[in-house]
Structures are given as structure tokens and as C-alpha cells.
Amino acid sequence: MASVVVVVSVIAVVVAWNAFIYAQSNGRGWSPLWMAFNCTAASGLFLLAGFSGYTLSRHDRFLAHTAWTGHVIWWQVTVGVVAALAASVFWRQGLRHPPHRPASRA
């Protein structure tokens, strides 16, 4: 029962934090351009790390006593390719329909 309380508490904190960030940014965090920026960064990180053999898993680094594997890490490359595909979709959406905000008057 205690583990259920911990899991529910963690989920509640994550949901509250996301709601706070969403309210503070006026929903910009979920706009297609911001999603494109995030997916592009994730894609670059995972592709570079995967092709160079640098493991992003803390567990694997702890067990091997090094972050370098000496071979391509295909699951990281796959995640990078999927993130790149998602980024291309978000870039198309974001550039096709840019958000319009009226100019503020100071």
C-alpha cells in the first residue's frame, strides 16, 4: 500500500509541475515549433551518442566502468531516427502555421 501512495504522489507532482509550466508559458511549450526544437535536440543527442558508441544508460556505464562501448548502440540510433521523424513533422506544422501574436504596445 505504501508503494501505491508513493507512485500516486510522484504522478501528482509531475502533473502539477507540467500544469504550472503550461500556465506560465501560455501553452507555448506544446506548440509545434517548441516540439520541433525539442525533438531536433533529442535526435541529435541520441544519433551522435549511438553512432559514436557512447552509452546514455547510467546502469550500463556503472556495470562496464566506462561510458564507451566500442560499437554502435542501435537502440539509441533508433530513438534518434524516430525523434528526427517526429521533428520533421513538427517543423512542417510549425512553419506552415506560425503562431501570430499581435505586437505589444509599450
Image: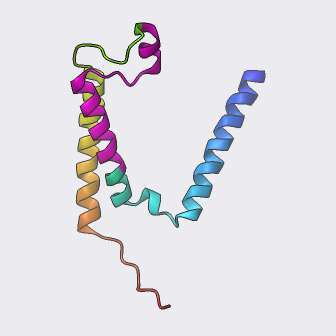
Count of number-bearing discs = 0
Per the image, is 51 magenta?
yes
Quadrant of residue 8 in the image? top right
Majority SS type along the magenta span: helix
Identify the magenta region: 38-63
Please state the horizontal and vertical placement of residue 97, each as a whole percent of the image.
28, 69
Please state the horizontal and vertical placement of residue 99, each as a whole percent of the image.
35, 72
Residue at the spot 65% in from the left edge and 49% down from the top edge: 16
* Residue 105 relative to residue 54: left or right: right
Judge whether residue 1 can be spotted in this image. Answer: no
Q: Vertical placement of 44 versus 104: above or below?
A: above
Quick one: 1 or 71, which is closer to the camera? 71
Please state the horizontal and vertical placement of residue 10, each as a whole percent of the image.
67, 35
Q: Vertical placement of 5 versus 28: above or below?
A: above
Residue at the spot 23% in from the left edge and 24% down from the top edge: 52
Residue at the spot 23% in from the left edge and 67% down from the top edge: 96
Q: Which residue appears farthest toward the right when viewing the image? A: 2
